Structures are given as structure tokens and as C-alpha cells.
Image (tube, grey):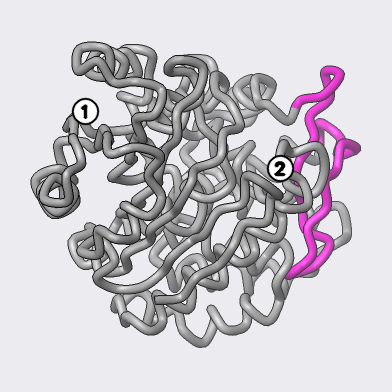
Amino acid sequence: MRTLNVALGERSYPIHIGRGLIDRPELILDALKAPRVAIISNETVAPLYMARVAEPLEAAGVKVTRVVLPDGEQYKSWESLNLIFDALLGARCERSTTLIALGGGVVGDMVGFAAATYQRGVPFIQIPTTLLSQVDSSVGGKTAINHPLGKNMIGAFYQPKLVLADIATLDTLPARELSAGLAEVIKYGLIRDLPFFEWLEAHLPALVARDPEALIEAVERSCANKAEVVAADETEQGVRATLNLGHTFGHAIEAGMGYGVWLHGEAVAAGAMMAAELSRRLGWLDAEQLARIERIHLQARLPVRGPDLGADRYLELMAHDKKVEDGKLRLVLLKAVGEAVIHGGAGRGDILAAIEARQGD
């Protein structure tokens, strides 16, 4: 087991990374405020892992409430959030009850938001079961649900007490979901860690083949990058926004296609290519750097072009993004591979041209 720490003073917490951690109840027991938990999962993950988490806790004297939600990005909504509240209230869960998010990013985001708001705040633990959630959404305290007009527009910053990233859960992950997670792994190399990007170029085949040591290394280095950024800028007033490379374009893809049609990581990959294309048009990246970024996404079996929504439609959807400030769209772009910048000065013509160059076949 490898352990990192997210340094946030009194709200600091560990990230444990390794194989077989889901079968170590003592890691969870040590983090509980009281012997009462609610484990929230979905219809796909619960049959695989719910009992393995719940039964050892019950054997240790913990009262467990089990909640199973429908699976899919389209269910990241008020309706699903209320299913969590209904279960908590029905079971008379108190403020000392710890919520445990067992699943991917959708489950983690919703459970975190439920924890932030149920009785004005209860503790929660993240047990992410997808690569994307292990390297990104489970770390840093961003919680949210979607709105038809924009992704993650309703939520709160609320930190977990513990993140338990069991690499063994990736054994049951569909290949498409694994690739979607690699989009967020590649992002860390692109925005701030050139040596990691170079490591990824050499180890992508091992990651796609689910080599355990390669996966542990990738998750640890991704989480270390995110933990550093979150410790420096918890509520995204500055440098944390660079973690959104590709997300403004990607969120437009998800909203424009309908949530769940494109996986989040797929949309981020296509969005990162649009951001890289715009960076080239602004004179920051050259053609070889752009080709290098495309190659690593293709190695990860990710899309390098977005759907043909029409460039104007992209801009319309992007106008609802959280990174719009004073009516101005602020984009995360690349000065170089390994160096991101937040830029609000790109002209409409350049943005439209970058989208046109990277949408459709």
C-alpha cells in the first residue's frame, strides 16, 4: 500500500493506493466518527463490491445502511440525490453517520454533495472503483450534480475523510472505461509534469494491458499531482483551474450529445485536443508537439476529435461553463507540453477554427 496526504490543515486526509485494500476494513474503521455508515453505490458496482465492504464492517459492530442508485451520467441529478436523502432519512441516519461512496465519479460526486448537505454536513469516505475516479474525481473535494444546461453546475467543495483506491477494482472495469480514465492521467503530464508525460509515453501499452505495477504508479503520480494543486488552491481561485484542461470543450460535448453518450474521459480527450489545437494557433505549440499529444491519446484508445455539433453550438454550450468570468470565457491552454496556462484572450475566430479543425471525422 502506498499512501499520500492531501495537506489541508485540520481537513487533511490520506489517499491509500494498492491492491486488495477493499478487503481491509480496518482502514475504514479507523476513519469512522461513530459505528454507523451508509454505503452508496450503483446497480453495476454494488453486486461486485457492496457485500465485501459492508459485511466486515457489520462483523465489527458497525450499523450499515445500503443504498443502490441507477448507473449512468444521466442519473447525476436531483432525483438521484433525493434517493440518497430518502434512504438516509428513512434509516434515521444521524450527523455522526459516515457516508461511503462506492463507485465511479458519478457516485462519488453525488455522495460527496449529499454529505455536504445532509444535516448541514456529515463525514464521507471515497472508495473509487474506476480509473477516472481514482486519479481525479475522488480527490480534492469537488462534489456536484448536473443540470441540463451545464455539467457539475450545482455542488459544493467538501473534502472526504479518506480515499481508498483499490487497483484490483480495475480488473472488472470495461476497456472503454479504462481508456476514459487514462484521459485524466494524461492530463497531469500535459499541464504540469513533463517527466510523467514522458513516462506515460513509454508505459501506455502496459497501462492499457492493466499491468498492476504500472497502474499503481500512474494512480500514485496522478494523485500526487492533484494533491499538490488542491493543497495550494482548494476552491479553484487560481492554479487549480489548470486541472480543467479539455473540460470546457469536453463538457460542451457531454451536454450537447446528452449526458452518458460520451464518457467523461472521452469528452475530455477530444476537448484536450481542441485546447491543444487552439494553443498551436496562438503560437505556443508547434505541429510536432500537437502530433505528440495526439499520439498519446490514440495510444490510450481515446478519441482525438469531438462530435460534429457545429462550432457555434460548442460556443453556446461553453458559455454556461463555470470558468466564464465577467462574461469572458477563460480556457486552459498549453504553453508547452507540461506547462498549462489559463487564458481569457483567445479570439472567437481562433476558438471557432480550433473547434472546426477537431470536430467530426
Q: Name the residue under label 2.
A: 234
Crowd class of label 2 (few under 14; some 14 to 19; many from 20; radius 10 Å): many
Position in image of residue 85 (x %, y %) = 31, 15
Residue 327: say if magenta. yes
73 shown above or below 230 = above
Q: Mark 1 points at which residue?
A: 69
Disc on res. 19: none
Foreground residue, 178 or 92? 92
244 sits left or right of 21 in the view: right
Residue 255 seen: no
- Between marks 1 and 2 in the image, the one whose residue lies nearer the viewer: 2
Q: What stretch is highlighted in magenta?
A: 324-349
Residue at 17 percent across and 51 percent down: it is 60
Residue at 47 percent across and 78 percent down: it is 217
Amino acid on which the number 2 mark rests in the picture: Glu
Residue at 54 percent across and 43 percent down: it is 359
341 shown above or below 190 = above
- Image quarter of residue 213: bottom left
- Image quarter of residue 182: bottom left
Residue 145: say if magenta. no
Determine the secondary structure under disc 1.
Answer: strand
